[in-house]
Image: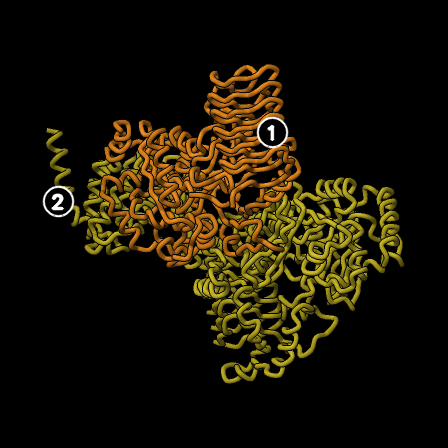
Chain colours: A yellow, B orange
């Protein structure tokens, strides 16, 4: 298409834009055109996969609606019937119009199709529109941003797109590393590079005249405000497939018509992220549970679902859940309607869907169990995704990273190996245009083709153990195997990180390039990923852990712990703890710090402990005003000594030190001695240690009395 | 000499107090790299006048550096000069000029060894924990003490001083030739900074980059953001940790230049440091207990000063993976209002002479008359001769009748005939200019002679050279080959 023609088209667009100035439109791409979610996406479109029990697309549509978008075009490709049915029944039906094309294999195809439709049908896309994919979770406001885009467009004809980026605190290893360069003043995008394996970023010299800001800590939210030129550009450049790799880089590198792309960094108080792969599925789920996406959280009704009730420690469940008293539900867990949980099961940091039945003594950690799943007794599930209708027979074990697709059956005592993907469908041997396809990774396609022959049939394999098993374990191709751990929901193992560092060190002569430690490693900042095996996951244990984290943070930050009192007070109220509990928790934190600090001998440990006590006695003193609280501290210490061999010989010394520092008074020690006097012999170890000391105290007080 | 003892005593005394501006107490050694007979400044420099002694407003350029350091209380200096002859000359001047104020050692090194080579040659003189290295050809009022303080604050391996690129090319000064020269270094250094502008993440010479500049992803990953700027210039004032500097000089015998080799090397390897071996740590820690305590205090202080409630990315990086060492490359960015020029080209020589008696006259140390110029009382002016603002006329110079001097520096004991026009030029001591000459944008070195009616535009005349009667020259260099 010639330039003149396009100009004409642009003018027409502009006029129509003037006519319907207030009308805000959005295109939602309900197909990611990748294979990252296979095998799940063979049976259900990706945007209908549940994210914390609500289909992904509901988050996107709810957000767009509340942001003031008046017309949403949902582009459907794979499984379009399922999606259209769903949308028809949903509350969005008045807002949403669907566009169906089965021929599209990429974003480029989709946009070209929409562009063609525009001429055949009336009142399609007019002027500016928001382009998002159907797996976006966000709560950012859009109207202002669209206005900014329009104002800029008016000033500068060539500014055709505004791309939303967000500073990310933890670097997402799951997605490829993103490097962008922007003009520090105008925020024009100058460079975009995602995941090439080159160890360097190459910037054209001409960019440097004004100065550029190169960022690695930005997340591309794939939320774009586009002008109508974007569609016509896709039409003109029929080889554009990928929105970023081809379109954005095409504009930046080839300098087509001088078009410009600008970036908009959203404030940290707003949330925006895309579910690109299983890792981001995991991350976004956790963000939703931790309410970063408010108001799109499980206890608020935004998509016609029944909202759940939020309890303490981030547990969402219905108030009348059917649950055995002995079942242990840990923090940050969502449990859906009609789900039954049996005796002695432990569930934490997981999402359980509706209508599941979980037997007794099941362990579920960091996993996503969808609807109507049956898990029999004694199963162990860690960091797995289990789809609707799956049956896991007694004693089966899912190793980390497993994905079980719809209606798979795992036989009794079967161990599903780590990172394996299981589906009732065979691994496809050829690409079908109706399905999602990875156009860019041709090599991937060919390896699928080869590996399809070597399907390991689970049934045959498990028949010796249990004839009930059903499903194929998909063969993982070698070429993508290393990506497997990158994209799965399992936290990246340490050695893999080290390997990555090594690998990156290898290229380049003096290159020190490495992936930095992500949030996953900084355990103290991201409690959700750690402490998964903490045994005392009860209220007090949780409280104690939070106190300890608060305490350590204060120590790390500025060595001045006096100001954490208000923090601890707020924790105390939120957990409904007594002052004695606080005292115990703080003392526990202090002693743990002493033990964690480097020491080679008992005397060094003693020195550590005394220095910490001296430093922090102000905080501790705040909570040990009563004798009972002081006794609590001593009891806590006794408890710790029983657990730690290193600490136990120091019991008397430290109690004495506490006495010297006026943390505990002699009355407290004597009362403790009296209480303990009647205990079992085994329980009196420390009392016996203290005998001389107590004797001395008694004498001292008697002297005073006389 | 007595004055010099004081800082040293303080340094070892137990009641040590950290103050930002008294760098001498901070165990810093100052090295001034004064160069030799620089070829880029031919024909201004000669056997008689090494680069360090080139006159800027009738004072050797080195004196500006010494004054700057003295004002920051840096009085213990090592001046490194290339070549024995030059060293003698510089040493002679120093002993006559400032022996009473400063404690200066002059060290001669072989010619053309480069800045790194010069430091290698005097390495055995370096004993302090940190070394401040100052180029001997800068005319500036940026505080070197601030560099030293930044260096200490971050406990950096190297700290570089950056200045805003001088707003170059005042159109009236140089004429067309000058303009071209000032345009060229528009992209001299490409500098990558972190978002707090504290660390130097990347440095490249703009002239070496042909098409695109390549930045390592690793450093980007570690720092998150990098601001690439081309509007800053490296001021050639560096603070180095001595152990690091010596290690690099030992390990890399091929390195010749601090700026082109050593600094980029340190910046490049900051996440994979080779320069901190255990040996150097032991050595540093073994400096005596008293000092160690002092250093610990400094570390604590430095964290407070740098407002480092969170660890720098270097520390984060180091803690992330085992057995990795990092070192910090820091920057101090001088205020934009500060003046800074390096006397490294003829154009710079002209600029600096003009500025020191013009816009940046606070540097010259002279007091200006009501007409914004300096005419020595012993200078003689003929009738109807005007000396405009921003001019300087040295001791015992004579100017004939009907002359006009604008924005120029004229040295001591010059003889200038009648009807002479001197604009935007530098005339050094003992030069003779015949009647009817017209000089624009030129440099006349000492003892040179211009015969009658010579017209010079953008020319340089070597010391002692005689330009013949009536010549009209433009953009030429007069020298005996």
Residue A585 left/right relative to B454: left
Q: Is residue B98 visible?
A: yes
Rendering coords of residue A541 (x, y %): 39, 50
Rendering coords of residue A701 (x, y %): 14, 33
| Residue A692 badge | 2
Residue A570 left/right relative to A287: left
Q: Which of the two residues, A245 or B436, is positioned nearer the viewer here? A: B436
Q: Is residue A214 above or below residue B152?
A: below
- In this view, the mark in front (2 or 1): 1
Q: CA distance from mark 2 to mark 1?
A: 111 Å
Q: Residue at x 26, y 49 (%)?
A: A638
Badge 1: residue crowd in 10 Å (few <14, some 14–19, many ≥20): many
Residue A121 left/right relative to B77: right
| Residue B408 badge | none
Badge 2: residue crowd in 10 Å (few <14, some 14–19, many ≥20): few
Rendering coords of residue B257 (x, y %): 44, 50
Q: Residue at x 59, y 18 (%)?
A: B401
Q: Residue at x 35, y 50 (%)?
A: B120
Label 2 sits on a secondary structure element that is: helix
Chain for numbered disc 2: A
| Image quadrant containing the N terminus of chain B | top left
Q: Is residue B426 above or below residue A349?
A: above
Q: Which of the two residues, B31 or B316, is positioned nearer the viewer here? A: B31
Q: Residue at x 16, y 42 (%)?
A: A694
Q: Which residue position holds label 1?
A: B452
Label 1 sits on a secondary structure element that is: loop
Q: Which of the two residues, A594 or B133, is positioned nearer the viewer here? A: B133
Rendering coords of residue A435 (x, y %): 71, 70
Q: Is residue A572 visible?
A: no
Say if mark 2 contacts mark 1, CB within 8 Å. Answer: no
């Amino acid at each position: 298409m010639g330039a003149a023609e396009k100009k004409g088209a642009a003018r027409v667009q502009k006029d129509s834009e003037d006519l319907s100035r207030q009308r805000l439109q959005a295109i939602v791409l309900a197909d990611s055109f990748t294979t990252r979610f296979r095998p799940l996406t063979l049976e259900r479109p990706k945007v209908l996969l549940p994210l914390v029990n609500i289909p992904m697309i509901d988050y996107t549509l709810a957000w767009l609606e509340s942001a003031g978008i008046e017309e949403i075009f949902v582009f459907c490709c794979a499984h379009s019937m399922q999606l259209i049915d769903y949308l028809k029944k949903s509350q969005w039906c008045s807002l949403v119009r669907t566009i169906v094309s089965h021929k599209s294999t990429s974003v480029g195809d989709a946009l070209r199709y929409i562009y063609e439709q525009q001429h055949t049908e009336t009142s399609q896309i007019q002027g500016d529109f928001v382009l998002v994919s159907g797996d976006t979770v966000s709560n950012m406001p859009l109207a202002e941003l669209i206005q900014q885009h329009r104002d800029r467009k008016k000033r500068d004809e060539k500014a055709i797109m505004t791309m939303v980026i967000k500073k990310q605190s933890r670097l997402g290893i799951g997605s490829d590393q993103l490097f962008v360069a922007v003009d520090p003043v105008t925020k024009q995008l100058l460079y975009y590079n995602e995941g090439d394996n080159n160890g360097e970023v190459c910037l054209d010299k001409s960019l440097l005249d004004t100065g550029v800001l190169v960022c690695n800590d930005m997340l591309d939210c794939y939320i774009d405000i586009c002008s109508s030129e974007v569609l016509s550009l896709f039409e003109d450049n029929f080889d554009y497939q990928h929105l970023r790799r081809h379109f954005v880089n095409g504009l930046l590198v080839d300098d087509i018509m001088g078009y410009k792309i600008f970036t908009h960094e959203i404030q940290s108080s707003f949330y925006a992220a895309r579910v690109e792969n299983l890792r981001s599925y995991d991350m976004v789920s956790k963000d939703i549970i931790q309410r970063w996406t408010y108001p799109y959280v499980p206890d608020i009704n935004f998509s016609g679902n029944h909202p759940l009730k939020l309890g303490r420690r981030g547990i969402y469940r219905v108030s009348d859940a059917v649950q055995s008293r002995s079942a242990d539900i840990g923090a940050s867990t969502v449990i859906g309607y009609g789900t039954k949980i049996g005796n002695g099961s432990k569930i934490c940091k997981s999402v359980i869907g509706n209508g599941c039945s979980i037997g007794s003594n099941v362990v579920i950690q960091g996993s996503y169990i969808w609807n109507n799943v049956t898990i029999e007794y004694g199963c162990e599930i860690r960091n797995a995704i289990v789809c609707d209708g799956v049956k896991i027979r007694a004693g089966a074990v899912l190793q980390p990273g497993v994905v079980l697709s719809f209606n798979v059956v795992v036989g009794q005592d079967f161990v599903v190996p780590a990172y394996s993907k299981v589906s009732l469908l065979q691994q496809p041997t050829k690409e079908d245009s109706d399905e999602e396809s990875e156009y860019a990774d041709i090599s991937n396609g060919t390896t699928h083709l080869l590996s399809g022959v070597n399907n390991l049939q689970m049934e045959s394999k498990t028949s010796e153990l249990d004839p009930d098993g059903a499903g194929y374990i998909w063969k993982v191709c070698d070429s993508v195997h290393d990506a497997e751990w990158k994209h799965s929901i399992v936290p990246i193992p340490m050695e893999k990180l080290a390997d990555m560092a090594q690998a990156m060190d290898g290229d380049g002569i003096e290159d020190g390039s490495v992936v930095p430690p992500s949030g996953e490693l900084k355990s103290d900042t991201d409690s959700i990923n750690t402490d998964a095996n903490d045994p005392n996951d009860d209220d007090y244990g949780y409280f104690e852990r939070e106190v300890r984290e608060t305490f350590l943070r204060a120590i790390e930050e500025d060595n001045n712990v006096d100001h954490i009192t208000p923090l601890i007070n707020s924790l105390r109220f939120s957990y409904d703890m007594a002052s004695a509990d606080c005292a115990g928790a703080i003392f526990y934190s202090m002693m743990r710090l002493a033990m964690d600090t480097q020491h080679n001998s008992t005397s060094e440990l003693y020195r550590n402990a005394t220095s910490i006590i001296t430093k922090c006695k102000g905080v501790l003193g705040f909570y040990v005003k009563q004798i009972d609280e002081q006794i609590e501290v001593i009891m806590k210490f006794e408890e710790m000594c029983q657990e730690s061999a290193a600490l136990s010989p120091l019991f008397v010394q430290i109690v004495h030190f506490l006495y010297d520092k006026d943390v505990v008074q002699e009355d407290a020690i004597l009362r403790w001695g009296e209480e303990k006097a009647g205990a079992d012999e085994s329980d009196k170890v420390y009392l016996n240690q203290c005998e001389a000391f107590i004797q001395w105290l008694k004498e001292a007080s008697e002297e005073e009395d006389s | 000499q007595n004055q010099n003892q004081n800082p040293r005593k303080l340094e070892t005394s137990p009641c040590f107090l950290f103050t930002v501006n008294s760098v001498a107490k901070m165990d810093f050694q100052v090295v001034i790299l004064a160069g030799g007979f620089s070829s880029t400044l031919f024909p201004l420099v000669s056997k008689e006048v090494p680069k360090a002694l080139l006159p800027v407003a009738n004072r050797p350029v080195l004196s500006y550096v010494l004054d700057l350091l003295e004002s920051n209380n840096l009085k213990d200096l090592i001046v490194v000069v290339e070549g024995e002859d030059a060293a003698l000359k510089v040493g002679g001047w120093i002993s006559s000029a400032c022996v009473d104020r400063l404690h200066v050692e002059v060290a001669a090194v072989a010619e053309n060894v480069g800045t790194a080579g010069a430091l290698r040659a005097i390495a055995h003189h370096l004993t302090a924990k940190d070394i401040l290295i100052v180029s001997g050809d800068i005319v500036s009022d940026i505080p070197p003490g601030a560099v030293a303080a930044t260096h200490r604050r971050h406990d950096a391996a190297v700290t570089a001083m950056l200045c805003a690129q001088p707003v170059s090319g005042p159109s009236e000064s140089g004429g067309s030739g000058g303009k071209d020269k000032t345009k060229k270094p528009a992209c001299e250094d490409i500098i990558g900074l972190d978002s707090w502008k504290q660390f130097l993440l990347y440095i490249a010479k703009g002239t070496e980059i042909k098409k695109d500049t390549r930045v390592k992803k690793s450093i980007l990953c570690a720092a998150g953001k990098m601001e690439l700027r081309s509007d800053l210039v490296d001021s050639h004032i560096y603070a180095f940790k001595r152990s690091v500097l010596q290690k690099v000089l030992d390990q890399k015998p091929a390195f010749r230049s601090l700026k082109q080799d050593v600094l980029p090397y340190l910046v490049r390897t900051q996440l994979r440091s080779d320069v901190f071996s255990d040996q150097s740590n032991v050595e540093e820690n073994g400096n005596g207990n008293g000092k160690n305590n002092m250093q610990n205090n400094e570390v604590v202080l430095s964290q407070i000063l740098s407002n480092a409630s969170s660890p720098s990315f270097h520390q984060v990086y180091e803690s992330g993976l085992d057995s990795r060492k990092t070192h910090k490359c820091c920057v101090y960015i001088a205020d934009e209002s500060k003046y800074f020029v390096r006397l490294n080209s003829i154009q710079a020589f002209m600029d600096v002479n003009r500025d020191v008696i013009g816009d940046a006259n606070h540097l010259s140390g002279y007091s200006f008359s009501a007409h914004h110029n300096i005419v020595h009382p012993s200078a003689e002016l003929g009738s109807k001769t005007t000396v405009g603002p921003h001019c300087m006329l040295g001791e015992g110079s004579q100017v004939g009748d009907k002359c006009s001097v604008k924005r120029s520096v004229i040295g001591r004991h010059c003889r200038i005939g009648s009807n002479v026009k001197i604009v935007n030029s530098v005339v050094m001591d003992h030069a003779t200019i015949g009647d009817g000459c017209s000089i624009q944008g030129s440099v006349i070195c000492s003892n040179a002679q211009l015969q009658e009616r010579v017209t010079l535009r953008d020319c340089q005349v070597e010391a002692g050279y005689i330009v013949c009667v009536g010549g009209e020259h433009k953009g030429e260099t007069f020298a005996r080959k």
